[in-house]
Image (tube, rainbow, N blue to C red):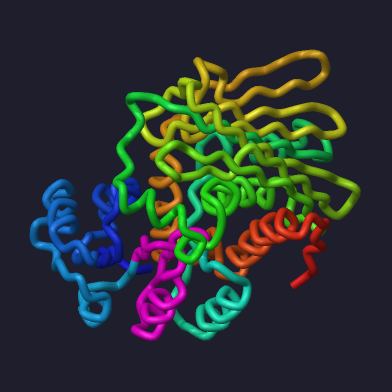
Amino acid sequence: MNTKPFGIGMVGTGRISDLHAIEYLQNPHARIVALCDRDVELARRRASKWRVDDARITDDIDELLADPEVDLVEILLPHHLHLSAAEKAIAAEKIVSLQKPMCVSIEEADRLVAAAELSERPFKVFENFVFFPPVIRAKQLIDEGAVGRPLAIRLKSNKGSNRTAWEVPGPTRAWRQERGSAGGGPLVFDDGHHKFALAWHFMGIAEEVHAFVGKTTYPDGSYVDAPSIISFRFPGNRVGSLELVDSPELEVITRHYAQDDKVEITGTKGVLWINVGHGRLGDPAPVALYRDGTVTTYHDMATGWEESFVLSTRHYLDVLRNGGAPVLTAAEGRRVLRFALAAEESARTGRTVRVTAD
């Protein structure tokens, strides 16, 4: 068991880094020792905000990776930079946590899986939604047989607005609009990773995917890939769907992204709902179960979206100290990426895409 705190080096200190930092700052087994960003002043502001004023600040990833105090590298960069940064971190024999999606193509993912599997250091693709407390409770209920055998999963994301939502800087919004840097659409590919990961978490990887992906363009020229609907078929005669909607005047209660996320899982004996995600509409029960003519609601859990980041990072630190497998492994991250890319391909070709076995 490791007893010395892991030295954390964060590569990329943009908006999302505030959530990634929470557990590292409060966990006695971690210490943020270095920050890297091409905007050095931004990195300095993060260091001051997080009260890690003694952390090394640099705009050079090679300098951070050469620092012997850095044990674990948290990579929070635009998607097209993931492969090169992760390969450098692996070559430097660092533990890696790589923001989702792991890459922008299966060819890149194959390279990264091979490198991660040859390395003696752990590698994780960071996915937080599977650690969201309502998702954890729902998975426990399903594993206990609450709905019988799961037959279908329905996911819906409704983008809206709220004055309390956090501010996303212009440069962050800009790179997510470009396929060259984002790899796909902002809702289907980028945020969609969370939904495809949830589908995998509850049902496994689909074998067929069919998608209609729409487009809504805003007055400033930016766009969102909605309305969209993606359907998938799983082995064992089971199905699923993902619906994406943009409702610009819909008020979503949130402190983060103004987006309502819902999951419905139907089984042979019941139906289960997860009613909260990035944000929420009103004050629903976080989890509800219909079984034998009765609805049971579950409220005794944290529902702040930040909790999913905290628990995901905590789990990885526990794995590093005590053994076990991270979630997601490189191979699992590749499977979820393939799921998302199948949706993009189907929308582009107008055809159902067969997701081949590994």
Image quadrant where one finds the N terminus: bottom left
**Residue drawn at point x = 42 percent, y = 75 percent:** 86
Q: Is residue 180 left or right of residue 208?
A: left
Q: Foreground: 187 or 301?
A: 187
Q: Which residues are magenta?
A: 74-101
Image quadrant assignment for residue 13 = bottom left
**Residue drawn at point x = 58 percent, y = 48 percent:** 192
Q: Foreground: 297 or 38?
A: 38
Image quadrant where one finds the C terminus: bottom right
In reply to whether residue 223 is colored magenta, the answer given is: no
Q: Can residue 322 be seen here?
A: no
In the picture as drawn, the residue positioned furthest to the left comes out as 54
Image quadrant assignment for residue 9 = bottom left
Compared to 61, does 218 lie above or below? above
Q: x%, y% of residue 215?
A: 60, 43
In the picture as drawn, the residue positioned furthest to the right comes out as 237
Q: x%, y% of residue 149?
A: 83, 40
Compared to 305, does 336 lie above or below? below
